[in-house]
Image (cartoon, rainbow, N blue to C red):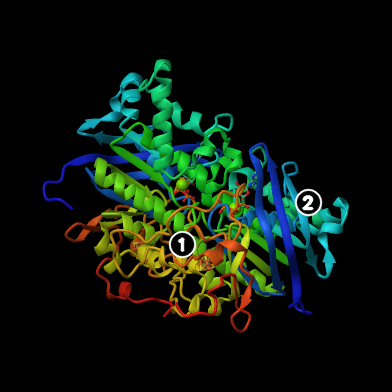
Amino acid sequence: MNENKKELLRVEGLKKYFNTPGGLLHAVDNVNFSINEGETLGVVGESGCGKSTMGRAILRLHEPTEGKVFFEGHNILEYDKSKMKQLRRDMQIVFQDPFASLNPRLTVSEAIAAPMLIQKMYTKKDRVELQKQVSRLMEMVGLADRLKNSYPHELDGGRRQRIGIARALSLKPKFIVCDEPVSALDVSIQAQILNLMQDLQDELGLTYMFITHNLSVVKHFSDNIVVMYLGQMVEMAPTELLFKNPVHPYTQALLSAIPIPDPDYPMNRILMKGEITSPINPEPGCRFYKRCPYAKDCCKNPNIGLKEVEPGHFVSCERIGDPELKENPNA
Amino acid sequence: MADNNTLLQVKDLVIRYETDDGVVEALNGVSIEIHTGKTLGLVGETGAGKTTLAKGVLRLIPSPPGKIVSGEVLYDGKDLLKLSEEEMRKIRGKHISMIFQDPMTSLNPVMTVRDQIMEVILQHNNISKKEAEKRADDMLELVGIPAERGHEYPHQFSGGMKQRVIIAIALACQPKLLIADEPTTALDVTIQAQVLDLIQKLKTRDNTSMLLITHDLGVVAQTCDYVGIVYAGEIVEYGTLREVYKDMRHPYTKGLMASIPNLVENVRRLQTIEGLMPDPTNLPKGCKFSERCKYATDKCREKVPDMVNVGGEHMVRCILANEEK
Ligand SMILES: Nc1ncnc2c1ncn2[C@@H]1O[C@H](COP(=O)(O)OP(=O)(O)OP(=O)(O)O)[C@@H](O)[C@H]1O
Ligand SMILES: Nc1ncnc2c1ncn2[C@@H]1O[C@H](COP(=O)(O)OP(=O)(O)OP(=O)(O)O)[C@@H](O)[C@H]1O
Ligand code: SF4
Ligand code: SF4
Ligand SMILES: [Mg+2]
Ligand SMILES: [Mg+2]
């Protein structure tokens, strides 16, 4: 990490609610954080906790319900269509589901070329140059040249994800939201892609928001980590601190559940109760209440909020500091 | 070898896809065996042929371009490849059920999730709609989704929630064999732990066997009894969990293990296995890993190495299998 850090992205009070037949679904509920240039923010949390929605809301692929998103100091939620289109070059996303996010009628090379044509980085006249750039991008992400004319359905998940990465890189963005970019990939390819993304970050000074549920990946890759639960941030800290000293009971359960690739490793998982709070019209108070092994009446306090427990380390839990929180309830 | 406890035995299965760009040799003589109540984990690089194997067992290979060229799939002693489509339909869902890799494509977008679970239950059980609805709701709760969300449609669910619905559908009829293709890849670890615990519980209750396809070597270590490592359409290492993890012999297996980001040590760069899997339309003649293997010699490139037993049930497809490295 460098000394004079420059903030690239700041998110303030971001909310995204969906209208559903059952009521208002609080997918992202008052999220605040910032990311410095050239750094990576890891976002982890349970499936359905709002990570993808948050990533999309930041890029305005879902229009946020409330809040501010500052990119290089400007609130981009105030941008009109044409300014947004310009901004798209700088802010890109690699989608979680490489199949659903690719147009089935475009070949690999067409899919990779499309964003560059839309952004008018190349015109019809530069066909040859464009094709060269497509080849370079394919090589960069490890796609064999023979696949140029293949269609997405003919490819396996790993190769489809590489197309997504090549597309995102094609516009030379400053900021990329990576929504589970490697979870469809096996470990050896995953390592190649992570190294690739790291090289690109070093070379091009890229800034990443890295959404994943794979904690060993997030640990390897991120400078800071945000842990989300049901649309809210429950803990945020520099990576080292979070792994050394997880404070929120959900974070503790999360870290204890990482499957270690050793049959002799004594897994000591903190099991949570099964009852899951619905994100539709959630009750006030801690949203982890129904599953938390430490829940008490005081946890129904409607204004828990993040508190700094050590420099840079924020936690949202009513029982911070209670010695009970340090013990594994299943041990 | 096959005995009374063998529920599924795949012998020398060869599957190809005949495409415009050539013949994809997806599965090149794969043999596996699954015992009653046991779990076999299949691990391998993307494109290695894991899904092809799983779909081959259920005869769900899209044809064209896919073709089961040769081999046998013995389920309870019967060769599934010889059954009529009608007989096969009875096997699917009731006896062998599969959790597909791509949650988006295996759920029906215009049907509520409860209806989709009910549909399978009603298809294979002679019970009233009311009972089926109750069972569907129980299954939803079992996989951690509040039953009151059952009337929603797949697009209203997150990727992980969809995957849990799919697990609910697959387990709704208590199959004897569950084939799970990356069932927890879309899930975070706490839900993954719950889902794996859940599958484990249902497995123990019904003595279900499982073929678990995953690229998470941690998940394998925590759930499987046996492991098969797949590379370019072949099994390159096979054995009990302990044999493979504690005494891995194949250079590819070693490479895989080394490329996992380590939670304890911090490294700037991850170890990788250099290069890519060979083009399946143009496989090398000898050992399929030879292009990437640092121990490769001319001998490796001459012919496909045999599976060698290195003790116990541990089999390795490498000419150096019995040497110390
Ligand atoms: N278009 C939509 N309409 C209604 N609800 C939605 C929509 N998209 C997402 N949701 C809901 O918002 C919540 C958050 O979903 P999201 O996809 O952001 O979760 P996630 O954290 O990315 O999960 P995963 O790890 O499974 O990908 C979920 O309850 C989901 O059902
Ligand atoms: N319908 C198809 N048409 C042509 N080729 C196919 C088809 N389905 C799979 N293949 C090819 O067969 C090979 C094996 O694919 P398969 O999907 O079985 O791999 P996998 O091990 O499941 O990979 P992943 O980990 O990415 O899911 C790949 O080279 C793939 O491109
Ligand atoms: S506020 Fe209470 S219920 Fe919520 S995480 Fe803390 S201890 Fe658990
Ligand atoms: S047979 Fe040769 S090339 Fe193949 S894995 Fe063994 S040493 Fe490497
Ligand atoms: Mg998501
Ligand atoms: Mg597959």
Q: Earlier in the sequence, mark 2 or mark 1?
A: 2
Q: Are marks 2 and 1 in contact (CB under 8 Å)?
A: no
Label 1 packing within 10 angstroms: few (<14), some (14-19), many (20+)? many
**At numbered mark 1, what does the secondary structure look like: helix, strand or loop?**
helix
Mark 1 falls within which chain?
B
Q: Which residue is mark 2?
A: B129
Mark 2 falls within which chain?
B
Pick whichever, B67 or B212, lies toward us.
Answer: B67
Which numbered disc covers residue A179?
Answer: none
* Residue A65 appears anywhere in the view: no
Where residue A189 appears, as percent x and y from the top left, is 45, 54
Tag 2: amino acid: Lys
Where residue A129 appears, as percent x and y from the top left, is 38, 24
Name which residue lies at 49% across and 38% down: A145
Where residue A28 appears, as percent x and y from the top left, is 39, 44
Q: Which residue is mark 1?
A: B189
Quarter in which the N terminus of chain B is drawn = bottom right
* Residue A268 appears anywhere in the view: yes
Rendered view: A228 above or below B249: above
Q: Closer to us: mark 2 or mark 1? A: 1
Position of B35 with respect to A168 (left or right) is right
Name which residue lies at 58% across and 58% down: B183
Rendered view: A301 above or below A139: below
Tag 1: amino acid: Val
Pick whichever, A4 or A242, lies toward us.
Answer: A4
Position of A40 with respect to B36 (left or right) is left
